Amino acid sequence: MGTFTKAFGGMGGQWALSNTFKDTASANLMIEGHSFVATGTSMDNLFKYGINTSGYYNGAVGGTNIAAMVSRAATLDSKIVVETSTNKNLLIIYNGVNNVDNTVGSGTATYNALKSYIQARILAGHKRIFTYTMTPSTEGGRSAQFEIERNVFNNSLRNDLVLFPEVKILDTDTVPELADCTNATFYADLLHPTTAGAYPMSQLFVSKLKIIGLGGVVAKSYDFTLTQTGDGSGIAQLTVFTNAIVAFKLSGNANFYSDAAGTLNPTKLFLATTSTTLTLYIKCTGPAILTMDRNRLFNIPYPGWKNVANAPSLGGDIGVVTSLTNFSIAGLNTLSGNINNLPSLVSFSAAGNNALSGDISINNKFINVVIATNSGGIICPNVLNLGALYNLDLRGLLLTSNNINQILADMWANRDVAKATTTRYIDLTGVVGSGAPTGQGLIDKANLQAYRSPNNDSSKPFWTVLTR
């Protein structure tokens, strides 16, 4: 990347973008401030999972004012690491509101305290500091005077603090959703952001990283197409589980709804919170894009993606969502991709008209595989050490006798590997034109049907084995 200069920010603020400000693979991310960004908050999770971090430190504490940050400065500064071409130190600061408290504090005094603190951090070795402006509030008796002092503080950041080459201003006043602190969608209590409010706050940081050439530290987002079928009145549902905050966004002619009928609370943004299984309801009346903002989606459990008549079909490469451990899809869709690209996947189910492709290797990582119907390019899987597999349904594939014999031989050879459930099921009937077991395959089938895995345990069921 060549050297050039791009103007942005407040009065005269410019950044020289050179080879030292190129896309990086990771960041040593440090956070300081008050309750908005404290550990365990939505902002904390959005930063933690939205950035590819090599190190992560959050010293923010609820109720903190700038003097309290000064008292913790030595610990923060000790977290600086030696930078490389692929790893940079980044510091996020979010503070000020607890200094301008209940109309008592001065916007100018608060700004001067923050400026002094930041100057000290620069001298300590912080090269890239991202500082938030103050959002509006009427909580705790804050009045019109608070708004005056808030604007003094924010304007000082835009017009003075921005002149420090190490500082980037994250201007919350540019976000329409944050303009009204009485909007309960974005503010929990007239002061603190909800998860929906925290998301655009976090995106100010993400956007600034991209502007200054550090977009490489941002976790990838993935786009999938939504295509209207029929009159578009049908509702598709997507069941997901994640252990992090994940933003699902829609652009174009589609909306999320809170009910299965697709009538309540239409929105373009849905935030999945941590450790929760939830269902998204989607209606589409024209071309649209479904975006998952980071690769933290771990589970699309049954029924996974499911559509009905007039509901949108899903397209795109599922192989990019490498965090998936469980993936289930049903309905008329045009997904592509090879599940071999999903290193953590252990359970896979595809029913319906899904154009998945690839020579799928079903190996000892899998416990459940169902390909009930498929019009795509999946060919008969390679089979290697099936291990813990307890359910194998390949009715959607064209299976030769050799394929079936190989699968049955491997299942028999691994009959005593522990299984996760009491299910013992194999369906190798395949699509029209598939073969039947022959020779040793017939013997392995009969042996499995008379066996209770593992170790012929009488408390377990016999295998059900279906073939032509």
Image (cartoon, rainbow, N blue to C red):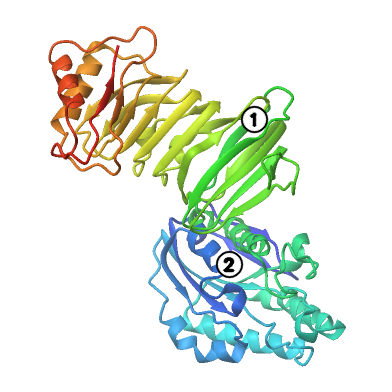
**Amino acid type for the residue under numbered disc 2:** Met
* Rendered location of residue 109, percent (x, y): 72, 91
Q: Is residue 354 visible?
A: no
- Kind of element beneath mark 1: loop
Q: In this view, does 256 lie above or below 338?
A: below
Q: In which quarter of the image is residue 421?
A: top left
Q: How crowded is mark 2: few (under 14 residues within 10 Å), some or many (20 or more)?
A: many
- For the residue pair 379 and 416, the one nearer the viewer reads as 416
Q: Residues within 10 Å of mark 1 (few under 14, many from 20)?
A: many
**Mark with earlier residue (2, 1):** 2
On the rendered image, what quadrant is the C terminus found in? Answer: top left
Q: Can residue 83 be seen in this view?
A: yes
Q: In this view, does 455 lie above or below 310?
A: below
**Amino acid type for the residue under numbered disc 1:** Pro
The mark found on residue 312 in the picture is 1
* Rendered location of residue 403, percent (x, y): 24, 17
Q: Is residue 260 above or below residue 211?
A: above
Q: Mark 2 points at which residue?
A: 43
The mark found on residue 295 in the picture is none
Determine the residue located farthest toward the top in the rendered image. 433
